[in-house]
Amino acid sequence: MTSDQHGREMPGSGLADTAGLTLAEGSFGELRGGNLGVRIATTPEELEAAQTLRYNVFYHEMGALPSDEARRTGRDQDRYDAVADHLLVVDHAIGPGPEGVVATYRLIRQQAAAAVGGFYSADEYDITPMLHFPGQVLELGRSCVHQDYRGRTAMQLLWRGIAAYVFLHKIDLMFGCASLPGTDPDAIASELTYLYHNHLAPADMRPTALPSRYVDMRRLDPAQMDMRRALAALPPLIKGYLRLGGFVGDGAVIDHQFNTTDVAIVVKTDLVTDKYYRHYERQARDAQD
């Protein structure tokens, strides 16, 4: 599974909304790994390419039900796209621009969310703890990778790009929604139970599913579970968040349109201690010497 948020259509969405994009402001340059590079989108055409990739993954592959507008345009788009920074992995063997986009992640900072009335995740979760968290917060979403690039390299580049972005903008907390396949919580009971009992966020940074959408994650007796097997069954993206020290919120949310069960993810960036983050920190210090 390579997506963590989905493409719901919003009134007034579309590329006409991208006229005010300031995508270059979020740029950290380009980081390369062979023919692949990761950077922030800088043109409306690159945003269109990301939206098209999202449509192909969410609707064609995952079986989501598109609106008439999404079906007509062949793009997954909403009003948040206009204020977000869009992380891209580009295959330079295909081309350096929109034609080469093979992976994407949507990044929304707090000031950007305020411009459109709030964060996307608020449709499923009470994110008040995020809004009151001291420091800068970042919502992660719309992650997807082209089916031909789902080896380690593309995903590693996305994580490198996120780490560089976090360092550049001094982000203190990242959050978003991550998806498990299917809409029957009992079919993924072990995964949900494992997440709740092993990775529940501390109360002061714990999102809670909205009452009308709340699904209890405590499906099984943890004493009777094989926790290692439950961990192994989680989607790769969720395991990636957990490796960064991530937590989950209280309650899952069923998304029937996208045939998924969502959980809230929270990651304090002071726990992002992998080699990529340390690398950018060293680079910044070296540049000041």
Image (cartoon, grey):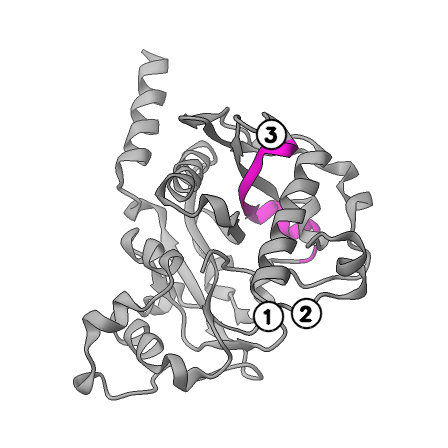
Say the numbered circle drawn on residue 28.
Answer: none
Q: Secondary structure at mark 1?
A: loop
Front-most of residues 255 and 102: 102
Instruction: Look at mark 3 in the image and give the residue it sits on.
Output: 25
Q: Is residue 265 magenta?
A: no
3 vs 1, front mark = 1
Say the numbered circle drawn on residue 258.
Answer: 1
Q: On the image, which quarter does residue 87 sit in?
A: top right
Q: Is residue 233 left or right of residue 41?
A: left
Q: Classify 10 Å Cα crowding around label 3: few (below 14), some (14-19), many (20 and above).
A: few
State the count of labels.
3
Q: Classify 10 Å Cα crowding around label 2: few (below 14), some (14-19), many (20 and above).
A: some
Q: Is residue 113 magenta?
A: yes
Residue drawn at x 76%, y 60% is: 71
Residue drawn at x 74%, y 53% is: 74
Q: Secondary structure at mark 3?
A: helix
- 151 in relation to 90, above or below: below
Q: Amino acid at mark 2?
A: Leu
